[in-house]
Image (cartoon, grey):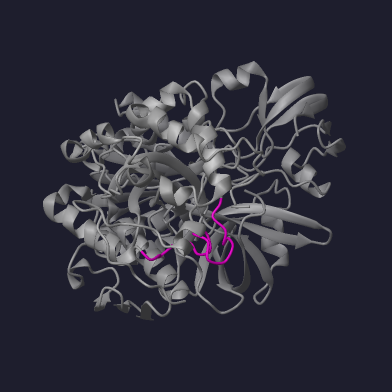
Amino acid sequence: MSGGVEIAVVVAEIEQAARNVKRFRFAAKDGGSLPHFAAGSHVVVLMRDGERTIRNAYSLIDRAEDGSSYRIGVLRTPNSRGGSKFMHERVSVGDELRITMPVNLFPLFHPGRKHLLIAGGIGVTPIYAMADELQRRGALYEIHYAVRDEAHGAFIDEMRARHGDRLKLYRRDLEEILAVDQILPGQPLGTHLYVCGPEGMIEAVLEGGLEAGWPKEHLHAERFQTPPTGEPFALRLAKAGLTCEVRGDQSMLEALEEAGFDPPSLCRGGACGQCAVDVLEADGELIHNDHYLSAAERASGEKIMLCVSRLKGRELVLDL
Amino acid sequence: MTVHFKQETFRDDYTYSNSPEAIRRFPFPFDKDEYMYSVNIEQHMPGPAKSPFEFPIDIDEHYVSEMRDRAITLAQDPKRCQSLPHMITAEWDLVELLMESMAKHYPELFTLTQDGDRWRWINRPLDIDQTFTFGDASTLPYPPMEYITRQCQGDFALLDQRLDNLWMDAGMITSQADWSLDFDIGMNFLEWHAPVPLAKDMAIFERALKFLLNLQQGRPVRRLNWTMTINPRLDTSPENYDKWGADRATVTPENVGRKVHLRVELQAMWRLPRSNAIVFSIRGYLINMDELVTVPKWARRFHRVLRELRPELAEYKGLTRYRQTTIDWLAKHDDGAPTSPGFQPD
């Protein structure tokens, strides 16, 4: 929910963890300890860019033993809408940022008998936390981690040191392919699979799991996404009497926040459902990009999620 | 704050009663003259001084006697406290939440000293001084959830979150309004609420579940629920139905005032940090009709609520046997004058 508890942090360390990935260590500004979190949690980082506040969600890698800091990993994306570019170019050690309380939309299934953790690229960040937690709990687990090449060294070295041969690495430059049909056979009953990585990889792994006869309740994915870009359109809030334009490079949620309106939201990635609103009129086609609304809800044309979905057309009127 | 702990019983001779101060702070649950379900959830923010909402965990004059009653119930039926193995992290989260809150808000009664994982807990009313290692269950005389909930008023359920649902996988339930942890353990949110009448059509539980799945750390919420109980009995469980069920047939116009109780549950929910579980606390308050009518507004209003209550709800809450007798008795305390909005006495 927007307006939730926020924590002031100071950037304590920045590390080039891979070619396009920086790892940031955040310490509480007041020197106290940061809240515990369950593996799979993310925080939203609020970045002040002049008048504008950019909000991006990042998975938490870990919390220092003494509670003094968190780490996140940020991939620099070529078509960055501002957040990852800001983190890579504008943030230095000693800078102050604000983060939200941790929220977990990618929880471990604790009663599971065994856990298969599958990561691709920057998708390793929640998987890293999950592996640590499973180790602490004395659970059975395997990590399967696909990277482009050795340049992903920082995560590999740390995970190798902590998890030894429970970590299986797949390097694309060596033509090592992470193939789900090689991993699934022979896994014991009650095994749960968790995947985080590029959308294509997630789809392939989930599909592979279903094909192998796994119940869908045993297949878990972090389906977070950044808001897709598109064409600009006009947005009108019927109750608030507010009209604004949604630029091609921003989401409805961002446009409303820029206009000084503060609708409820939580994950900003189409997963939690907090920002679902009723559609009153749509002069154009609704483009649903979330993972929350059911097929029937989408087909009804009566609901849309502010954080990732948009209109292809002229004007959208919402019941806000 | 000095609390004078009453010595009283919740079974056999039923010596429980409320002091005038306890009556004034009673969490009367009706803000208007009628009642229907709603998703009446609000932020669990600190409320007025001396009210049950002043602190996140409310300790009152019944604390010592309630804990004694819980111990009796557990001795007779250990299954009132159960925890599935994967809930151990949530159990420790609960230890932290309760000890920190109790020690912070009632420093005369409880003291918590934390040196890394080495904790010392002093509970003066129950004469306990325990040093233990946080995270190491072998350093406590009971499993962590059982240890702390033997020292905290209210029932507690720990709900695991997975598959976009909440699962009742642990709890300490000894003062329940006719439901059973032993029966519900392992069920999900929609399963254990299935017996509630009317709510399904109102999609109440789907909405409440969606809300709770997004409950955030640091933003606890609460709601009030209510039912009625004959005699001030905490343990109105299905397991012991033979011990209390028949009491419903003992209400007469002469004994309504002392036998019939309004039972209010202050239900609070917190997201727990390490486990991502939710703790659902059910803190019960009992007030008999003699005590209730000392507040004229509550007498008028409760009379009207009970008179207008839909029969399905009366049946579900188990009031049918003595409802009319109670309405007739309360009628003498309702002059028909308008009541002011809100919960508070005038």
Q: Residue at x 67, y 19 (%)?
A: A301
Q: Main secondary structure of the magenta part?
A: loop
Numbered circles on residues, count: 0
Q: Does residue B40 appear in this view?
A: no
Q: Is residue B146 or residue A125 the one in the foreground?
A: B146
User: In what quadrant of the picture does the C terminus of chain A appear?
Assistant: top right
Quadrant assignment, res B177: top left
Q: Say above or below: B174 vs B89.
A: above
**Where residue B5 sits: x, y (%)?**
34, 70
Q: Does residue B254 appear in this view?
A: yes
The residue range painted magenta reads: B43-61
Q: Say above or below: B132 vs B188.
A: below
Locate residue A38 relative to residue A71 in the image: left or right: left
Quadrant assignment, res A165: bottom left
Locate residue A80 relative to residue B255 in the image: left or right: right
Whether B125 is among the magenta residues is no
Q: Say above or below: A23 vs A44.
A: below
Locate residue A254 relative to residue B278 in the image: left or right: right
Q: Is residue A29 or residue B167 the one in the foreground?
A: B167
Quadrant assignment, res A268: top right
**Where residue B73 sits: x, y (%)?**
18, 53
Q: Is residue B4 or residue A143 the one in the foreground?
A: B4
Going by the picture, which residue comes out furthest to the left?
A: B76
Q: Residue at x 52, y 41 (%)?
A: B333
Locate residue A315 relative to residue A253 in the image: left or right: right
**Where residue A80 sits: x, y (%)?**
70, 49
Q: Is residue A211 or residue B237 the one in the foreground?
A: B237
**Where residue B100 sits: x, y (%)?**
42, 71
Whether B51 is among the magenta residues is yes
